[in-house]
């Protein structure tokens, strides 16, 4: 059971953006303007089943009359994408969180965007926003599965290379990243195999901070982060808003422990990659195990993903 606060938005229409990619156009039921957002932002969407899923906004940020998201049909996913594709959603309302941005555009002299499949969605919003020269490398299984090709072709200010795998094979990252210089900001979104490969190529030749990426799932081959770890120890978590202190045993997560007292908490992936459960830390030192925060955010200790992260100190105080 998951919950989410936010707006109830109307699914005005759905559109087929490519084979296996459905676009959802969300509007305020009373025609009001929607909250502002910046390219790279995503929203948490509560599906009819109660599942919460994160989708990047891929409409125009200056047009606040609607949000658009693109949803890939995943036969072997966790069920959310099939629910979207198999349910008649037009005319229904769905609870949507305020946009959150963990993939913001930074100022740069040049941009290199690398998109894999549905990873084009946050990048599409960026392409319409950047004023510096940009290059987009967009890979997909085949051309007919690659969404928003015409919109991208209509954009000014950059160059696009489409790389359908059935014709051109995998992206040649050695070549692609090899042409980037230190003044180029690289943005990558797509399957984890692509993200890991891009990370490796960038680490070998570019300064730290040049690469910006967004994960849609836990890294492959990573152990399930939300399961018990025999080396974990118990600690206390204080919920500052009520003053209640709970004991988190080694075989439970903070989220599981807190849900027993506060079942209305928002969460989704329970694997530390979606950011839905991010919680402010008021005292104590978190033991981070997520893939959302960057190094500076981890070092600050200001927030933690309570579905996977624990405490280095005997007690941690959360803004809950
Ligand atoms: Fe996704 Fe915690 S629920 S990061």
Image (spheres, rainbow, N blue to C red):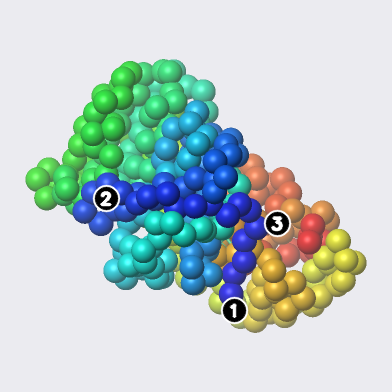
> Left or right: where does residue 22 sit relative to residue 261?
left
Q: Earlier in the sequence, mark 2 or mark 3?
A: 2
Residue located at (36% from left, 63% from top): 88
> Left or right: where does residue 308 sit relative to residue 84?
right
Q: Where is residue 83 in the image (x, y as percent from the top left)?
A: 38, 68
Q: Position of residue 200 (x, y in %)?
A: 37, 45
**Which disc, if any, is residue 203?**
none
**Which disc, if any, is residue 228?**
1
Of tags 3 and 1, which is closer to the observer?
Answer: 3
Q: Position of residue 106 (x, y in %)?
A: 52, 28
User: Considering depth in this image, is 265 or 170 the residue closer to the camera?
Assistant: 265
Q: Distance between the residues labelled 2 and 1?
A: 41 Å
Residue located at (49% from left, 72% from top): 49
Around disc 2, counting alpha carbons within 10 Å, would you say few (fewer than 14), some (14 to 19), or many (20 or more)? some
**Which disc, if any, is residue 16?**
2
Q: Distance between the residues labelled 2 and 3?
A: 36 Å
Cβ at disc 3 under 8 Å from ligand 1: no
């Amino acid at each position: 059971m998951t919950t989410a606060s936010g707006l109830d938005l109307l699914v005005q229409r759905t559109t087929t953006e490519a084979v296996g990619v459905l676009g959802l156009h969300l509007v305020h039921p009373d025609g009001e303007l929607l909250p502002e957002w910046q390219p790279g932002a995503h929203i948490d969407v509560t599906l009819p089943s109660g599942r919460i899923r994160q989708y990047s906004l891929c409409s125009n940020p200056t047009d606040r009359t609607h949000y658009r998201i693109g949803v890939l049909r995943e036969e072997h996913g966790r069920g959310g994408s099939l629910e979207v594709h198999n349910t008649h959603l037009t005319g229904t309302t769905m609870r949507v969180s305020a946009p959150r941005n963990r993939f913001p555009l930074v100022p740069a002299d040049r941009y290199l965007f690398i998109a894999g499949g549905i990873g084009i969605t946050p990048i599409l919003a960026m392409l319409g926003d950047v004023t510096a020269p940009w290059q987009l490398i967009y890979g997909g299984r085949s051309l007919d599965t690659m969404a928003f090709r015409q919109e991208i072709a209509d954009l000014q200010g950059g160059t696009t290379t489409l790389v359908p795998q059935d014709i051109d094979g995998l992206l040649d990252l050695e070549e692609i990243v090899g042409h980037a210089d230190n003044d180029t900001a690289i943005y990558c979104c797509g399957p984890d195999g692509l993200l890991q490969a891009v990370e490796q190529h960038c680490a070998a030749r570019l300064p730290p901070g040049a690469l910006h990426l967004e994960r849609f799932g836990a890294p492959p081959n990573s152990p399930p982060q939300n399961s018990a770890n025999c080396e974990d120890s118990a600690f206390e978590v204080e919920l500052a808003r009520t003053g209640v202190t709970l004991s988190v045993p080694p075989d439970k997560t903070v989220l599981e422990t807190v849900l027993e007292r506060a079942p209305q908490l928002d969460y989704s992936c329970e694997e530390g990659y979606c950011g839905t459960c991010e919680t402010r830390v008021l005292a104590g030192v978190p033991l981070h195990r997520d893939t959302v925060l960057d190094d500076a955010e981890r070092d600050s200790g200001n927030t933690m993903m309570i579905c996977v992260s624990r405490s280095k100190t005997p007690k941690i105080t959360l803004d809950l």
